[in-house]
Every structure is written in C-alpha cells, then in structure tokens.
Image (cartoon, rainbow, N blue to C red):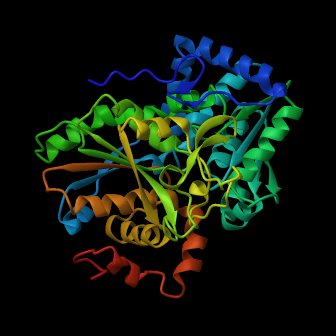
C-alpha cells in the first residue's frame, strides 16, 4: 500500500500548502492549530461529532446504483454517493459541524464564512442557529443573483448575508472580504472556511472532517459491488468535482492507499480549457500563493489573479486546495475538465434517467462519469460523489435552457444511446 502522510507539521503537502498570512492573523492561526491538535483525536469531541452527523445530518449517506444510467451508457456500472441527501442538501455540513464545535470550545461566539454556490453559507447558518452563534456570510454579488434561493435560506436561518461587489464579485472576492473581517475581529470571531484551502491548518482540518464521505464508501462499496457480482470490493474509479476541492478530498483521502482505484477530479472547463473562460486551476494554472497557501492558481505573467468562469458558482474559483496540487504532482490523482454545456447536459440527463436533480457542481462529475463509463467494461465500476442537490440551480438551468428545458442537442452531444435523448 502507498505510504501517505500529509501534510507535515508546518502544513505542507510537498511544496504546496503552508501558511502565508498577515501578522495580525498569526496569533489566531496559532490558536486554531493548537485547538485542533487538542481535539482532533479527543474521544469526547469525536463522539459528539459523529453523533451530530448521525442524528442532525442523517449520516451515513447512501450509495446508490444508477442502474438505468449504467445500462444506457453501455459500459461500467455507475454508483452515486448521495451527499445531496444530507441535511442542508450538500457535503458542506460535515465540515461546518466540526469547525463550529471547535469555535464553541474556543469561546468564539461570532462566526464568519464565505460562500459561492451558497451551500456552505446555508450549512454555516444552519449550525449557527442550532448552537446560538452569530453568523455573517460573505457572498459575491454575482453569486447572490444566481443563487437567490440559498440567500433567502441563510436569512431565514438568522444569518447576515453581505454581498461583495469588488473584483469579479464571486467566491474569490467573498473569501477576501471574510479574511478582512477576521483580521478586524480576531478576538471573538471564528472563520469557518468552506473548502480545503487557506492557511494551515484549514486544508488538513476540512479534509479530516469531510473524510467521513470516503470512509463510509470503503464500508459500503463491498456490499454494493457484491450485488452486481463484481470481482472487486472497491470501485475502479472515484470521481468528484473540484473547485476548492473539499468534496473531492473528502472522498479521495480514504482511498489514497487503494492504488487500484483511480482518483479523478473534474474541474470546470467553462467555455473550453483554451477559451480563457474556465476555472481549471490544475490544468491551466501555475504555482503561486492565494488565500494563505501555496497551490496552483490562475494568474497572468505578472502574478495577478485572472478572472474565472463556470456555470456553477461553487466551482468559480481561481485556485484549488494544496493537497490536490500535490496529488496531481505525485500522480496519485488525475484532473480533467468538463464544459458548461456538458455539465448542463448531464444535469438534465440525471434528472430524466434516475429522478435525481444534482447540483451543477456535481453535474460536472456526473458528466465525466458518463464519458468514462462508455470506455470501460460492464464488470467495472465508477463511484461518483454527488456532492449536492440542484434545487439552488433551477433558475440558472431554466435561463440557460430556454423554453425547451430538456436540452436535446447537448444531450446528443454526450453520445447517449437510447433513452429520451436519442
């Protein structure tokens, strides 16, 4: 088995990660590292965390065999890890509970967060309501417009939502504003970062809390594959979408030692990887420092962050978690791109074939699974992390699909045989 012990004591994943933060935040980060080191293996803390996951979130989330989709693809069997069935509708709640528990133990009554698609913001507002904590969520004004249902949900839950009008008015800019807030209120404020980015210990801490996803899959897949009379106990490939990359790290990390299982991260190719309108940091970016860590980022020749584009607000980010950069460098994970059109087509297809409405972020992973399945034999298997549900994206999909909500031309573009798209 692969020996994998990352990060090191300073938060480095090979040359990536680390902590690049202002002097003002040095004490707050040290305090956070010490608190996490104290509680990450504490039996009482872990018992409370898993109790919350079971009774509040509804874990374990099931693994579902997408039988009709698998038949129509004509290749590998496709399985979906149903994180969309969690309370609040996505994987984000797993991490938020862990960080909110830390905040309470550290005596921090005020919580701030950034959000793109709004799922992390909703999860943060939810746990703050449960624990009686003040909640402020920063969200790019562009994302406020395209994710209005989640904005309303956050407000219903008692959160203050602050639109950010600087820069591209998306996730990057929301994170910038949240960092500024933290600098100004370090004494009473805990910053719940929603992805595996930021200064150490955030990439490690968020990964650890999200690893419940992959840990459950390791236990669930043998029985699922036995039903299909497969000759393996684990999937041949695990696929997840990657923006910052928390849902992907959550399912990838427990599978890293299982070298026969391919790990495939799907970035937002937007209008095409060579169009300049995408969010594919690992495939078209270069090494640099963003939001407190060294990783792969989209930047120009002067090191300035370039604007990104994706149909999905949660993938519209110019960087990626440093552990993903390291997994790509050592060859343990591979990263591919899916365009807006392909993701939209996969969104429609999953709705019509399996009765599941996926988030547009997750639709990128579904789209690549559909492509890959057709190249594999029927006795092999693919496990997709269906990281969130698509209620929040209905308006975006309706606007993009026009009067004919079922986008038949792009469905045919996926090469689907049989079924309603033929």
246 and 284: which one is in front?
284
Residue at image coords 61%, 59%? 313
Residue 393 lies, with reference to residue 175, above or below; the image says below
Q: Residue lying furthest bottom in this view?
A: 403
Residue 8 image position (x, y, % from top left): 53, 19
Q: Residue lying furthest front in this view?
A: 301
Residue 122 lies, with reference to residue 272, above or below; the image says above
Residue 54 lies, with reference to residue 262, above or below; the image says above
Q: Tally the numbered discs.
A: 0
17 and 109: which one is in front?
17
Would you say residue 313 is visible in this rendering?
yes
Residue 24 image position (x, y, % from top left): 85, 26
Residue at image coords 82%, 25%? 23
Q: Is residue 215 shown left or right of residue 25?
A: left
59 and 71: which one is in front?
71
Residue 32 image position (x, y, % from top left): 70, 21
Q: Quadrant of residue 315?
A: bottom right
* Quadrant of the snapshot with the C terminus: bottom left
Q: Is residue 332 shown left or right of residue 261?
A: right
Would you say residue 59 is visible in this rendering?
no
Residue at image coords 59%, 72%? 396
323 and 216: which one is in front?
323
Residue 148 image position (x, y, % from top left): 70, 64
* Quadrant of the snapshot with the N terminus: top left
Residue at image coords 54%, 73%? 397
């Amino acid at each position: 088995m692969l020996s994998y012990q990352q990060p090191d004591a300073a938060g480095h994943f090979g040359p990536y990660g680390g902590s690049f933060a202002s002097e003002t935040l040095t004490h707050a980060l040290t305090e956070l590292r010490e608190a996490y080191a104290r509680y990450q293996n504490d039996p009482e803390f872990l018992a409370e965390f898993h109790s919350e996951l079971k009774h509040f979130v509804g874990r374990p989330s099931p693994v579902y065999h997408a039988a009709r989709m698998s038949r129509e693809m004509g290749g590998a069997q496709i399985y979906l890890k149903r994180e969309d069935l969690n309370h609040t509708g996505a994987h984000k709640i797993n991490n938020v509970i862990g960080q909110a528990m830390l905040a309470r133990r550290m005596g921090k009554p005020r919580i701030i967060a950034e959000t793109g698609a709004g799922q992390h913001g909703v999860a943060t507002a939810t746990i703050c309501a449960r624990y009686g904590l003040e909640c402020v969520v920063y969200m790019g004004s562009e994302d406020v417009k395209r994710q209005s249902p989640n904005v309303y949900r956050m407000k219903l839950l008692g959160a203050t939502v602050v639109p950010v009008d600087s820069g591209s008015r998306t996730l990057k800019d929301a994170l910038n504003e949240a960092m500024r807030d933290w600098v100004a209120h370090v004494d009473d404020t805990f910053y719940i970062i929603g992805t595996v980015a930021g200064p150490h210990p955030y990439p490690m801490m968020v990964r650890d809390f999200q690893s419940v996803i992959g840990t459950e899959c390791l236990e669930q897949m043998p029985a699922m594959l036995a039903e299909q009379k497969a000759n393996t106990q684990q999937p041949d490939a695990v696929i997840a979408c990657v923006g910052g990359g928390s849902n992907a790290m959550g399912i990838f990390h427990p599978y890293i030692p299982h070298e026969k299982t391919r790990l495939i991260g799907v970035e937002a190719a937007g209008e095409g990887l060579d169009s300049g309108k995408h969010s594919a940091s690992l495939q078209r970016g270069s090494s640099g420092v963003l939001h407190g860590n060294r990783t792969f980022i989209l930047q120009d020749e002067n090191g300035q962050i370039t604007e990104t584009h994706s149909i999905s607000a949660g993938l519209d980010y110019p960087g990626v978690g440093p552990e993903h950069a390291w997994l790509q460098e050592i060859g343990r994970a591979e990263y591919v791109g899916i365009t807006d059109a392909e993701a939209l087509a996969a969104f429609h297809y999953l709705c019509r074939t399996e009765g599941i409405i996926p988030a547009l972020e997750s639709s990128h992973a579904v789209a690549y699974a559909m492509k890959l399945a057709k190249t594999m034999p029927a006795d092999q298997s693919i496990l997709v992390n269906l990281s969130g549900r698509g209620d929040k994206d209905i308006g975006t999909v309706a606007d993009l699909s026009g009067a004919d909500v079922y986008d038949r031309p792009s469905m045919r573009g996926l090469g689907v045989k049989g079924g309603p798209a033929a």
